Image: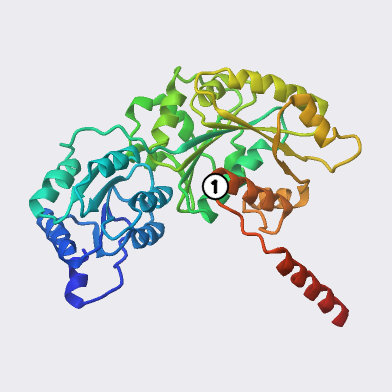
Amino acid sequence: MNILKTLIGDKEPVMVKNAEFVAFVCDETNTETMRRYVAQRMLPHSTVECGSIEQAVQYLRKMERPPAQLVVDVSDSDTPLSALAYLAEECDPSVDVYVLGAQNDVGLYRSLLQLGIRDYLVKPLTVDLLTRTLGDAQQGKAEPLQRSRTGKVISVLGVRGGIGATSLCAHLAQHLAEDQQRRVAVVDLDLYGSAISVLLGQQTNQGLMDVLQNIQGLDPQYMDRTLMKVGSRLFVLSCALDYGDSFEPQPGSLRHLVETLQHHFHYVLIDAQRLGAGMSVMTEEALDVSKLVYLVADRTVHSACAVTRMARHIGARDNEPVISILLNHTSAPSAAHVEHKDFIAATERAILLEFPYDAPNLTLAQNLGERLNPRAPFAQAVVRLGNDLSGVEQKVAPKHQQWHETLRAKLKQKVS
């Protein structure tokens, strides 16, 4: 516990990578009150520091898994809602977030609840106040809260087989987890193939089938035992049944699974099965809870027809998911392919992004079960897609800077 830190005068936060309780309070007086609360309740895995929301975010990034409770202080912030929106981008949806402030502001309190904050406490703090709010929640006595913060569900769906939707899903998941530091769950709906696991260098278990068969017992502990862990922020649910085996999940089980995952991950990526193929019933359930659907196509007449039909079918459901078209080159571009502008005219839909032909890099990464080379053209396209998804602005050098860099490169070639 960090009470020892206070005694020895260490100014750096003591890293408790599996802390269940984390608090960053702006002033030393209320920080000491928080430490007395932690000592009184004898919380074995906890961190209490005098610091800001920014410091809390940096601490969360270093943790192996998110805490159950997080306390942050906005009393020194001129724009508390903006600071908490920044925190929400980094904080796992499953974390109960409590906010400390200096003003008893009803308007602010309502705005915080809309952000998914568990409660708002006005300083000065007392151990009794903390026990009534934080302690009851730890013991399960607090009233259940309808969370407004949930992860984004995205289905990746190829309009035909062999079009690269699974590869795109796997590399996008790695980018979001490793480069953007988001917690990502990938659900592979191919019960017999499990290509996602191969692409990520993992051996497949029967986790997806086990979860769907025991969906009523789904809880955080069960998920920890069942999801395959790829690094510290990427988790996979997949299955590899023998070809002679059959499995029919209960209606609604996949929907229940995805809605549960939403409370624990920033992104839930679903590698969906092609509509009309086997197990497309699960794909239909996935589409019913997806906020965004990526339709992956190539520049062929077949794909253009399939995009039109699928977009019409997906867009007709009640949740009205956003449909984005991604073009992927699975073969070297040639004059035989449908022109970009003709594809748009035929489907009457804009193309969000076009992925380049990059078979050598993709094949090497797949065979090794490793990430793509960051310089690979396909990898750079994945970064652009991830930035579009998360709203991250891609830094582009000013034109004059690019010109100078090009000039220097040419001069270097002449000299050498």
**Callout 1, which amino acid?**
Gly
Residue at coordinates 73% horizontally, 44% vertically from top-left? 355
In the displayed image of the protein, which residue is found farthest to the bottom? 415
199 in relation to 150, above or below: below
Picture coordinates of residue 307, whole percent (x, y): 71, 25
93 in relation to 38, above or below: above
Q: Is residue 202 visible?
A: no
Residue at coordinates 32% horizontally, 58% vertically from top-left? 77
Q: Nearer the viewer, residue 110 or 315?
A: 110
Q: Nearer the viewer, residue 86 or 146?
A: 86
Colour setting: rainbow
Residue where numbered disc 1 is placed: 391
Q: Is residue 358 left or right of residue 191?
A: right
Q: Is residue 41 left or right of residue 68?
A: left
The quadrant where residue 397 appears? bottom right
Picture coordinates of residue 139, whole percent (x, y): 16, 41
Picture coordinates of residue 54, whole percent (x, y): 37, 60
* Residue neighbourhood size for the residue with mark 1, other residues' Cα within 10 Å, grouped as few (<14), some (14–19), many (≥20): few
Q: Is residue 64 left or right of residue 337?
A: left
Residue at coordinates 9% horizontally, 56% vertically from top-left? 40
Q: Secondary structure at mark 1?
A: loop
Picture coordinates of residue 384, whole percent (x, y): 64, 49
